[in-house]
Image (cartoon, rainbow, N blue to C red):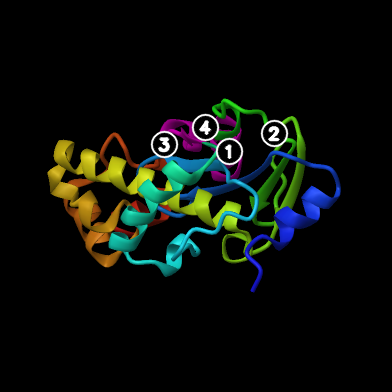
Amino acid sequence: MDWFAYENMALKKSYRMICGIDEAGRGPLAGPVFAAAVILPPGQMIEGLNDSKKLSEKKREALFDVIRKTAIVYAVGFATEQEIDKINILQATFLAMKRACDGLSVRPDLALVDGNRMPRLGMDTQTIIKGDALSASIAAASILAKVSRDRLMTEIDRIYPEYQFAKHKGYGTALHRELLKQYGPSPVHRKTFLKKILGETR
């Protein structure tokens, strides 16, 4: 497969700085939602690059550093659990994407965004369904977003060790749900995500 097919099509349309954007953490019950924006050198393939969900944690960690060294520019943004509760997860995801994009020191001409929902980024934008498995730029962004979020959840684990965030990263695993029943929500839980779960325990 051609990992740069979408980027090359954009180059043929006279776009020059093409940015891949992806998110991590839409589904968890706790913690922020993250997004990353990455501009790779045209045609610069990174060995082992893939959708972050298909990689082991060890491989993602290794690629995290390679991507940062290889990229022309990159940035990571997030929206807090409070913002998720206030404006809903979709809008919070868009906000994280906008913050990542705005954090780039080089302004992109075009943003390639994973998924089928169009964020307002203030620039030309193309959505690509399963883009993290089709575009090198989006795959790179997916890894930066995932590793950045996982690292934060490991830090949060030190503050709230009873929830074992380092193990499940805030996702709704059986262990996490059981700990929620035992301890109730923490300040980093998404209150709007817990209504059904906590309702079942009362």
What's the distance in space between the residues labelled 4 and 1, CA to CA? 17 Å
Range drawn in magenta: 74-99
Q: Earlier in the sequence, mark 4 or mark 2?
A: 4
Label drawn at residue 86: 4
User: Residue 82 at x, y = what percent?
Assistant: 43, 31
Label drawn at residue 121: 2
Secondary structure, mark 1, is helix
What's the distance in space between the residues labelled 2 and 1, CA to CA? 8 Å
Magenta-colored segment: predominant secondary structure: helix
Q: Which of marks 2 and 1 is nearer the N terminus?
A: 1
Secondary structure, mark 3, is helix
Q: Earlier in the sequence, mark 3 or mark 2?
A: 3
Residue 116, magenta (yes or no): no
Q: Earlier in the sequence, mark 4 or mark 1?
A: 4
What's the distance in space between the residues labelled 4 and 2, CA to CA? 20 Å
Q: Nearer the viewer, mark 4 or mark 2?
A: 2
How packed is label 1: few (under 14 Cα within 10 Å), some, or many (20 or more)? many
Q: What residue would you read off at disc 1? A: 97
User: Residue 189 at x, y = what percent?
Assistant: 33, 42
The residue located at (60%, 33%) in the rendering is 101
Q: What residue would you read off at disc 3? A: 81
Marks 4 & 1, CB-CB < 8 Å contact: no
